[in-house]
Image (cartoon, rainbow, N blue to C red):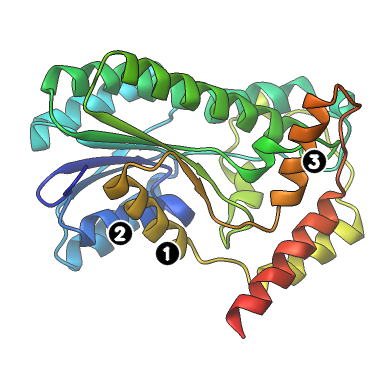
Amino acid sequence: MRDVADRVAVVTGAASGIGRAMANRLASAGMSVVLADVEEAALSQAAAEMARDGHRVLAVCTDVSKPDDIDTLARRTLDAFGAVHVLCNNAGVVPRGRLQAVWEHPLDDWAWTFDVNVFGVLHGLRKFVPIMLAQDTECHIVNTGSIVGFISGSAHAVYSTSKFAVTRITEGLHAALRQRSSRIGVSLLCPGVVRTNIREADRNRPAGRRGDAVEPEAATYNDAIAEMDAVAMEPSEVAGMVLDAILQNRFYVFTTDAWDEAIAARSAGILARADPASPDMVELIRREGRARRGSLT
């Protein structure tokens, strides 16, 4: 898209973190913004604050795992603003026990994470892409993946798997839209460590997806996260990258290059038909922290 002023954006997971920052940045660029989130109180507060700043906003309480909620989101968007030009499928969760092995996570972890991270994206695409195609105007879709959707290893088994799926979905979306010569651009946002509350996502976990109790995270992991949090990227920085990607029609949006070596090792291993490389997640987090400290000094 060459310009977003006076256009309409829909952002899921918009009550906090990266979603809230994207909503703010798009609104500041002149867009009307529909904020969607499952956390109703936080959503109402975000919309009220943005409205007080003079932005055109609409809040729609939305569980992205439910197709009916996405239908309502689309209907209310069109009723309020008549069109949609930017869709940010950003809502996401990460379950507890991030260092558990694949077989140790309860099935409820897998079901809940995929309900939100994968099917939430699919529901958004299935509803909004036809609307955008029918409009035949410049549009853009941003799906939030993750840097861990590009590396191997045992940590973040459930979350990483869901983000690998988002990567493939988004690449397939890009290819299909190009084949149709559509006017819809596509970006895949791949954040590293960002200062958000996604690690407390269980606060919004449905009662039917609670799973079993899990062991606390290893101290080394928590220590690395604490170190990284001191210099972690702010969501507003990520939002600026997203807006640039929309305006420049850029597909991959990585927030850091500190994980590039691990991504390259995985790719090289695949081409060499070698066993998967298994980088140390704690060390990767610390490496990103060191890189951030260097950029801030």
> On the rendered image, what quadrant is the N terminus found in?
top left
Q: Residue furthest bottom?
A: 297
Q: Nearer the viewer, mark 2 or mark 3?
A: 3
Separation of residues labelled 3 and 1 (CA atoms): 30 Å
Q: Mark 3 against mark 1, which lies toward the viewer?
A: 3
Instruction: Determine which quarter of the picture holds residue 121.
Output: top left
Is residue 172 in view?
yes
Q: Residue 52's x, y, as percent?
A: 19, 67
Question: Quick one: SS at disc 3?
Answer: helix
Q: Amino acid at mark 1?
A: Ser
Q: Which quarter shows the C terminus?
A: bottom right
Looking at the image, is mark 1 or mark 2 earlier in the sequence?
2
Instruction: Give me the residue at 28% from left, 21% from top.
Output: 129
Q: Residue 55's image quarter?
A: bottom left
Q: Which residue is mark 2?
A: 24
Which residue is denoted by mark 1 in the rendering?
A: 236
Residue drawn 30% across the image and 59% down it: 24
Q: Are marks 2 and 3 in contact (CB under 8 Å)?
A: no
Q: Which residue is mark 3?
A: 265
The answer to whether one can see residue 96 in this image is: no
Q: Is residue 284 above or below residue 181?
A: below
Q: Position of residue 161 (x, y in %)?
A: 69, 28
Q: Are marks 1 and 2 in contact (CB under 8 Å)?
A: yes
**What is the crowding at mark 3: few (fewer than 14 residues within 10 Å), some, or many (at least 20)?**
some
What residue is drawn where x is 89% and y is 43%? 215
Q: Is residue 275 above or below residue 36?
A: above
Q: Amino acid at mark 3?
A: Ala
Please tell me which of labels 3 and 1 falls first in the chain: 1
